[in-house]
Image (tube, rainbow, N blue to C red):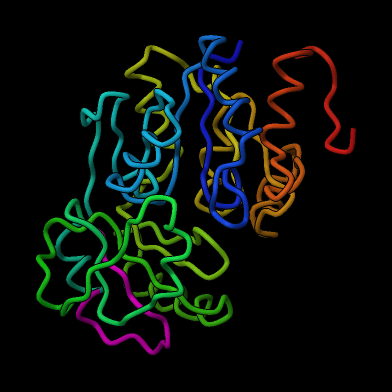
Amino acid sequence: MVRLAAFDMDGTLLLPNHQLGQQTLESLQALHLRDVNLALATGRHLQEMQILREKMTLPAWLITGNGTRVHDRSGNLIFARDLPPAVAEEVIHRHWDTTATIHIFNDQGWFTDRPAPELLVAHQMSGFGYQLCDLKKLPAHQVTKICFIDQHQNLCRLKISLDAALGEQATICFSGVDTLEVLPAHCNKGSALALLCDHLSLTMAECMAFGDAMNDREMLAQVGQGFIMGNAMAQLKAALPHLPVLGHCETQAVSHYLNHWLATPDLAYSPEC
């Protein structure tokens, strides 16, 4: 029996234009009416997700910052984890041989040192945006995550350097083809969802989850029913070859599956039907 459904946002629940489709919203509302807990599990910031949750008018639990924060449906903090200050200091102040832009997140917001207006397109629904500043002057003891944005091949080379420098002090993963993130060690959507399940007296086996990127891997692997988007990163499909692949976010494939599950949960599902 499914008692909680967790959804990644970009590339999964949202359309390619980063908007929420009406069919998807109606499916989520129908799921809520069936007494299934809803959780939005995303790399986006809490400040932004609070705005989006209100726009969606859904009583969803929030897993934000790729698992660094968990909040209940009323906005109360359940769990928080930051990067160790020494790790944040190392990443921020060390010279990395890369063309990637660097973005730092803490509870006050999103900070970068170079204008990147093209990144704001993904945040039009909320109006959330970055603040320009000297990153080296930010406090290192309250950093939730650090993000590098560049072409994928450049980030793959950077990941090798980050892995060598940080070792097991941090989790380094792709939250998108062009986005590489440095997170607290053992902190991911899966571990955060497990904590939420404990809070709700649920098991991970009672959860379903949907995702499209490597930052969804642990969550999808640990729940009772995990689903990969057709537009997902090839690395995710290769890492979890046993999980079913749905259609594309462009066709609101999550909604298509949920409608099937709500109406005929015992029948096999085909994305092509």
Horizontally, is 187 left or right of 132 in the view? right
- Which residue is painted at 34% across and 85% down in the image? 96
Total labels drawn: 0
- Which residue is painted at 29% across and 58% down in the image? 145
Locate residue 106: give its quadrant: bottom left
Q: Which x, y percent locates residue 21? A: 61, 41
For the C terminus, the quadrant is top right
Give, as a single range, the part of the protein colored magenta.
Answer: 92-105
- Which residue is painted at 41% across and 27% down in the image? 60
Q: Which x, y percent locates residue 268? A: 85, 22
Looking at this view, is 139 or 129 the one in front? 129
Vertical order, 174 against 4 (above or below): below
Locate residue 182: give its quadrant: bottom left
Magenta stretch contains residue 152: no
- Which residue is painted at 83% across and 37% down in the image? 271
Vertical order, 250 against 37 (above or below): below
Horizontally, is 99 left or right of 94 in the view? right
Horizontally, is 106 left or right of 101 in the view? left
Magenta stretch contains residue 94: yes
